[in-house]
Image (cartoon, rainbow, N blue to C red):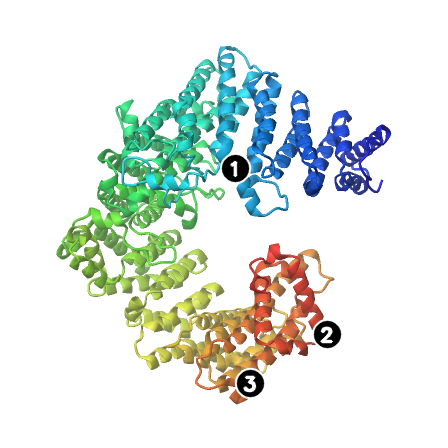
Amino acid sequence: MQGFTAPTTDFTELQSTMRAIEHACTSIQMHINPGASEAVILSLGQSSQPYKTCQFILENSQVATARFQAAAAIREAAIREWGFLSADDKRGLISFCLCYVMQHASSPDGYVQAKVSSVATQLMKRGWLEFVPAEKEALFYQVNQAIVGIHGLDVQFAGIKFLDSLVSEFSPSTSSAMGLPREFHEQCRRSLEQDYLKTFYRWTQEAASSVTNRIIESDSAVPEVKVCTAALDHMLQILNWDFRSNTSETKINVNVFSAGVRQDGDSLKRSECHLVQPGSDWHDVLILSSHVGWLLSLYAALRLKFSCEGYWLDCPIAVSARKLVVQFCSLTGAVFLSDDGKMHEQHLLQLLSGIIEWVDPPDAVSKAIENGKSDSEMLDGCRALLAIANVTTPYVFEGLLKSMRPIGTLTFLSMLMSEVIKVLMTSNTEEETWSWEARDVLLDTWTAILTPINTINVNALLPSEGIKAAANLFGFIVECELRLASATAFNDEGDSDYLHASVSAMDERLSCYALIARASIDVTIPLLIRVFSERVGHLNQGRGIIDLTETLEELYSLLLIIGHVIADEGEGELPLVPNTIQTQFVVNAVEADKHPVILLSSSIIKFAEQCLSPEMRASVFSPRLMESIIWFLARWSRTYLMSSDGIGEKILDSGHHHEHSSKKALLCFFGEHNQGKLVLDIIVRISFIALTSYPGEKDLQGLTCYQLLHSLVQQKHICVHLVTLNSWRELATVFSTEKTLLLLDTAHQRSLAQTLVRSASGIRNSEASSQYVRNLMGPIATYIVEISSKSNFKSIAQQPDILLSVSCMLERLRGAASASEPRTQKAIYDLGFSVMNHILVFLEVYKHESAVVYLLLKFVVDWIDGQITYLEAQETAAVVNFCMRLLQLYSSHNIGKISLSLSSSLLSEAKTDKYRDLRALLQLLSSLCSKDMIDFSSDSIEAQGTNISQVVYFGLHMVTPLISMDLLKYPKLCHDYFSLLSHMLEVYPETFAQLNSEAFAHILGTLDFGLHHQVIFGMCPFFNNH
């Protein structure tokens, strides 16, 4: 069968079509001729007006999949032909689907009913803006009659599920594609929210209430449970709706400084928490209806009735009820009256009175879970606390529990989290148990409470009981973390994410710990000083006598915790001293050395300095401990080391002496006129030790290069002092003239070269700055010249030591090139110019070494990118000539072509190498093009007869045949390729005709490919601009 013809009412034809569809569906299930069977099924939906046929199949076929496909065909045809259907036909299709769902509510083939229901909702939405209110009311009357329950429980259930499908279809995030503009979907969403959503909620609320007594009175599962569960799920779905009608009035009533609703600020939360803000129109149905009381009573009654049956907590009705309770905790905004938050508080208090039974007492609940009880109720209780924390201020949150317990909510939260952490530490497993999830949710709860406090005076927002609770919790956290570190110090089995996590993996959790610590900073800093001093004292007493592995692991964890507490990451910006540290300590600048944070920082720096002793390195400073020291120094130095003293003085001049005396003391003590330069020298010497005394420790060396040293040279006022230090000059000398640092990973070599060159910004004299770069990089250039000039270079080039040395030197050149700035531009140009011809020698010799070829190309790209806009005409001519030779040599060796005879794994590897090379070549051509847009030179390049377009078009002529359609699926390569084309078509359009027919046809092919794959290339500037 090739397809179905025009609509028919002939019974024989209807039966024939039905049998054909049934046979096709059965064949697909049995994998018999699936292509032909699929074509038969598709032809039904593609035929003109197949509605009578589809209805016949739905009403008569005994094959469920055939009925499913018939429903799908109705949807496809109706959406396609909607503009040609009469108003009666449109209403008739929707009514048929609705009646079918209700009449077959007892059918065991639930997926067919769901499909027909979905078709009804999609057709209803398609005509939503056409139907007059009376037509909509007529359709919804059928649904209401079903939900009321007059036609039985199955029909009642079907009616509720229909509303589920309808609300899902009208929600923008889950709506079906209809080929209509976004505005259509938005109008439908707005109309449903304003006119019907609350009505649907009330219907399902009443349906659930109507079966409650029957459920509670029954000693076993009854059919009413299914209806009640569906109703609860639908109410949850509606509360998850993205309400927009009352957004403006909600924002007006939000005030983070009042004891009421709070703003949803930025946080570190990982758990989802959707704020429910339906507006004042919902006040009657959600607040005045006593709906929350009914829900809590239902759950409490069933919980008590089935308390001996542990499985009940995971039954659908129990899960749905708890989810709805948790969602009610997120209710906020104008749905509550403007009564200074009293009604909202009463709402939360009512909820908490039911929720508290799920999690209190924490030790008894956790013990029951360990003995086999389901953890779902405990986890939902934690989620409810998080939801409440997101809609209240700390003062309101703290006071909620006091009306029913002798302690406040924050104190209870501290107790609950302490119990969860204790269970987590005790279980000591790699599997993510309930305590993992509970800990994360509770950490998010603390984050929700404390995030505003991190930027405002803690005493202004957190009650004294809350400060004490935070202090107790943080003390317990530190105790547990150190106990765990000690217990797992010798654990080499597996790679437990929790026990042996890297710094970055633990960063999110430790940042939450830091917020808790800062809430009681005047207690936690002295605690950290004491604990750190105890561990260091134990280390000094036991050195050479006992095994110190456990103590070293404790210090590792402690340094990570301290680093997060006293300093922020910054996320690309220079971080400020945490607000709580600025405001909670009042210290005279003259007695700054008594400031708790200065005492703590100084003790850590003094301890770290001991690693300079070979004896201490051998006995104490393991690579792992050094990693934590380097990480701490990098994070700490960005905040405290030589921060601008003038800022602190200006603050004090403004009159806020009390608030900022702590900040003034911190900035001055580690400033350039006090201890700053001394500490800077210590940090550089520690960095040198980390790079030279721990061979093979890539993680340690990576932290040193990428985080510590890199962060130092990012701040010019530090570079001014850095370049005067003997320790820095020693590092630069060893880098340029000795082989010690050649043992570093090649990527680390690049980073170190970039850092050392960038430090030249601290040299005030321009000529001295250039000379510093020449002295630093001159030996590297000399090595490249000498090794490539050897008569036997081709024969020794493949030796491992020569190959490694060449790779290291190229990485160093690349690092130096990427650090170019106006002051050092001439020195770096001279550096690149001196090795240009020798780079070509390397390209010739290493043409089969893809890694070396890539390094060569990346160096040239970075060098030209940093130089091209500054070059005079003669220099530009030399660079353009070099690029032309480079491209010719690359092309002559057919570098980049892939042999089809390679195995699949080698073919994949070859594609990756080719992709990297092509990206580098495209970036090179784009950098050359930039000369025509930005040029700081004093003369014109035309004076030298230089034509950049020629080399660019030669490069394009060479590169385009290598760019296959498969490679264009790489987003980055795609972006670079079409960015270059876009620029060239705008700047050099006339020279496109110079391309030969093959290259021109290939470019047109890539453009056509791009136009048909704009989902992939949507961000490409070519397709955005043309």
10 Å neighbourhood of mark 2: few (<14), some, or many (≥20)? few
The correct choice, above or below, for 334 with respect to 599 in the image is above
**How many discs appear?**
3
The disc at residue 191 is 1
Reading the image, the residue beneath label 2 is 997
Q: Is residue 853 visible?
A: no
The residue lying at 25 percent from left, 40 percent from top is 461
The disc at residue 946 is 3
10 Å neighbourhood of mark 1: few (<14), some, or many (≥20)? some
In the rendered structure, which amino acid carries the disc numbered 2?
A: Ser
Extreme-right residue of the structure: 12
Q: Earlier in the sequence, mark 1 or mark 3?
A: 1
Between 1022 and 965, the one lying in front of the other is 1022
The correct choice, above or below, for 52 with respect to 839 in the image is above
Element marked by disc 3? loop
Q: Is residue 568 left or right of residue 940?
A: left
Residue 196: x %, y % from top left:
51, 31
Residue 942: x %, y % from top left:
53, 86
In the rendered structure, which amino acid carries the disc numbered 3?
A: Thr
Question: Label 2, label 3: how many angstroms apart (C-alpha)?
Answer: 26 Å
